[in-house]
Every structure is written in structure tokens, then in C-alpha cells.
Amino acid sequence: MMTSELESLLNATPSLWRGQNYSGHVRSLSTGFDELDEALPTGGWPPGAVVELMIPGMGVGELSIWLPVIKRMTQEQRYVIIANPPYMSYAPALANAGVDLEYVRWLSLDDEQDTQWALEKALRNRECGMALWWPGTQRGGLSDSAVRRLQVAAREGESLLGLYRMTTDDCAIRQSTWAALRLQLSIRQEGGLDIDILKARGSHHCQRVSIGERVAEEEMVLIHA
């Protein structure tokens, strides 16, 4: 039986992995998709965390899945950084979705180490709510130590980093990671998006969640003028 003193100590350390007894965090952010919120042990995006998104290619919904949180962050006057995207987002579509563009920053650097350094600094600053980064290579693009540094920075700033991995290699997808959450995105044949939860701090169960067609439709609007 766990004593009240021990329970209080554990609750004061929200980043501690407690297996299936993870109780979440009051500042957990809703993803904006009820099905995904229900499947995640935190009830939404985990606070202060790196989220890896394994994608087979571009345009599967990898930006739209973040749209509700981008909107919320900018409305709360916290900055959103989009680093080295493979395409330029269509600003009017973001604005029409309720995103305050004054709080969106695009970062374009040729050197990935420079990008990592800049994101570490930004994520530690509490004025930065979240960042999205496409490193541009497959699993070998970032070392485990680099992901760990980014995870530490996100935790310190209570920010989020969406880290994209373009790969269909099952071995790469199943490799261990320092990220708090790893999702695999794929387009459903009948429309919509399948999300496989490969790793979620606080749970050891893999789970698939399907969300509606509007995600893929929104993606095409967001990335095309």
C-alpha cells in the first residue's frame, strides 16, 4: 500500500514514468481530437515533451494534427516555431483556422546542429509554446543524445516539440527513443488518418486510433496556396 507521503512525492514529479499508474498532468494539452485524447495516458499531448511522428511521406496530415494546439498556443501569445519544413505553409489558411500569425516563426538553417542548438534555446524559453522540426533524414538523422537534449529542453520550458521521422522501415520505427511519445501516421484507404501509438510514457500498450477525413483535407489547404 502506497503511503500518502510517497504518493505526494510521486505526484510532484510528473515526468516520472509510473507504468500504467500514470495519473496525467493538469496542464496536459488536448490534441483537439477526442479519440486521440482518450487513447493517450495524459489525456492529450504530454507537457514538456518531444513527440516523434513517423511518417511515410509528406501530406498525410502531419501538420493538421497539430493545428488545434498551434491555434491555442498563439492565442495564448506563446510562440510556435516551424523549423526547416519541406514545404511552406499557406499563411492565409493558418489565419483562417484561428492561428495568430504574429506568434508563428519559420526557422531555416542549413546545418542540423545549428537547428538543434536554436531549438534547444527556444524550447527552454517559456515564451515558446511549441516547435515542429523536420530534420530531413531518416532515423539516423539525430542521435539518441540529441533527442534526449531536446527532451530535457522541452521539459524545462514546459513546451512541445513535434519531431518528424520520414521512414517506412519497421526496424527504425520500433527502435527505442528518448521521446515521451511516438506516433506513426498513415492515410486510411477509405479516407482519414490512422495513428498508431507506438510509445506513450505511462503505458506499454500499442494502440491504433483513427480520425476523420478532415485532417487530410486540411493538410492540402495548409500546404498549398
Image (cartoon, rainbow, N blue to C red):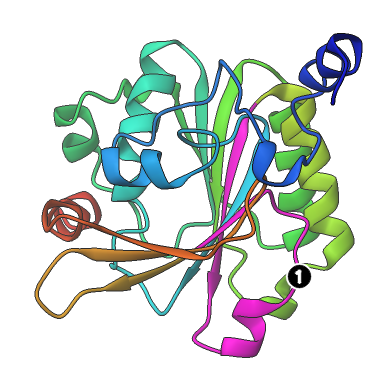
Identify the residue shown where x is 18% and y is 31%.
97
45 and 201: which is toward the camera: 201
Q: Is residue 120 magenta?
A: no
Q: Is residue 138 visible?
A: no
Q: Residue placed at 42% from the left, 47% from the top?
A: 39
In the picture shown, does residue 91 fall above or below 203? above
Quickly name the residue at label 1. Answer: 176
Residue at 38%, 77% in the rendered image = 57
Task: Say which quarter of the image contains residue 25.
Answer: top right
Quick check: 173 above or below 42? below
Question: Which span is picked out in magenta?
Answer: 159-183
Q: Position of residue 91 (x, y in %)?
A: 25, 38
| Label 1 neighbour load within 10 Å: few <14, some 14-19, many 20+ | few
Is 26 in front, or is 122?
26
Q: Position of residue 64 (x, y in %)?
A: 29, 49
Residue 60 vertical position relative to residue 152 in the rendered view, above or below: below
Choose between 98 and 16: the one closer to the eye. 16
Residue found 36% across the figure and 61% down from its top = 87
Using residue 158 as the reference point, say whether residue 108 is left or right of it: left
Question: Can you tell which quarter of the image residue 118 is in?
Answer: top right
Residue 135 visible in this rendered orientation of the protein: yes
Q: Quadrant of the N terminus?
A: top right
Q: Is residue 26 left or right of residue 109?
A: left
Q: Is residue 169 magenta?
A: yes
